[in-house]
Image: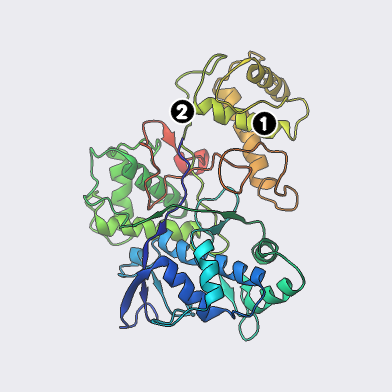
Amino acid sequence: MPTVIPFVPQNITVHLGPPSSSAANVTVPFIDYVKNVASSEIYPTWEESALRANILAIVSFALNRVYTEFYRSRGYDFDITSSTAYDQYFVNGRSYFSNVSRLVDELFNDYLRRPGFVEPLAAKFCNGTTVTCEGLSQWGSQNLAQQGQSSTQILRNYYGNVEIVNNAPIRGITSSYPGTPLRRGSTGPNVVVIQVELNRIAQNYPAIPKIPVVDGIFGSRTEASVRAFQEIFDLTPDGVVGPATWYSLVRLYTAVTNLSELRSQGQQYYSISWEYPNSYYEGDTGNSIRFLQYMLSVLSAYINDIPRVEVDGIFGPATREAVIAAQRWFGLPQTGNVDAATWDEIYDQYSGIENTSLRDGERFPEGGAVPAFSGNNTNRSRYNRTTTMTQFPGADLRMGNQDAVRQEVIR
């Protein structure tokens, strides 16, 4: 199961004014963009921890604009503006402060995100003196740095429970649109993307029929959902997802999930099959078993009667013992096999914990009891994977791969 980390673009296109102005666009290397904004927004004489915190906020905000295609999905030909009323202060052609440049060389492909979320945090900030906002105070960050706080402490002071992703991959990012229209008979990960988006948008627009199974197959129900979406948003209701419909889906999906806002619902899809063609038994292996073990490990941290298991993807005797303990706890037949009823009970209990405790930085701080998985600077919610609306996840999505929010998105 691939871990999806948003790419850092090699270049970023900046509009030198408010979005609707006739100002010029400039395309610059992303690292130079960050050096420019950092040199324009903050003072080089500040404490290093304050500089680091501000640079990470600048990187994260810019990456969020790129990741959500915030402007391009609205028909603009740029990624971000130089207007502080909308984005960050960019002065075309300016020089950089040497210490700021050095820190950006180190930090330009690191960014902030909420634990369990995929998208870079829309890390909004303001100077904290003449302008205040929900987000980081630039002068406030300097005051905290002078009190001895680290950059991580400063960031969490303003943004709450955030984590830092290090060394994100750098790639030349192109338009998310697949290049050819998607229509009845199309299959593959791009169909999964539009099915997920349609199901989530349908929560806010009930006239759009939900797609019962997100399977990557553009069938009659997907076509009906696309047509309804097109009719609501004044697009040609042909049931075909061309560029206009694709980017309308991106724009609406970003809007209903607040992905471009500081208080985002977050993007957190799982590459896990939620269908139950067969039960799971001792001796089974694979990613579904790995996810089962992870859920059981989370439950064991809260329910003493459920023993903790190693997350290795192998349904062995220890996993069977944990399953039996869970079945006993839920009042189910103690078979040691995982049928649909057992999986549902385990998932529902896990989901309740994940949505309350695991996202609460005070009640479940970094380094807690949930087992660690491979990855950068995070120790929980390792199965938060995404198809993403803009980037290929690194492996084919096949029949049965579905969104994790089963009742709200899939059904």
Q: In this view of the protein, can residue 351 be seen by the observer? A: yes
**Residue 275 disc label:** 2
Q: Amino acid at mark 2?
A: Glu
Q: Position of residue 394 (x, y in %)?
A: 39, 41
Secondary element at image label 2: loop
- Quarter where residue 148 is shown: bottom right
Q: Is residue 203 above or below residue 36?
A: above
Is residue 303 found left or right of 256 in the rendered image? right
Q: In this view of the protein, can residue 134 be seen by the observer? A: no
Number of marks in the image?
A: 2
Q: Is residue 151 above or below residue 117?
A: below
Nearest to the observer: residue 351 or residue 189: 189
Q: On the image, numbered disc 1 is attached to which residue?
A: 297
Q: Position of residue 250 (x, y in %)?
A: 37, 57
Q: Nearer the viewer, mark 1 or mark 2?
A: 1
Q: Position of residue 220 (x, y in %)?
A: 28, 38
Q: Is residue 225 above or below residue 231?
A: above
- Quarter where residue 150 is shown: bottom right
Q: Amino acid at mark 1?
A: Ser
Spatial separation of the CA atoms under disc 1 and disc 2: 22 Å
Residue drawn at (59%, 81%) of the image: 43
Residue drawn at (64%, 38%) of the image: 372
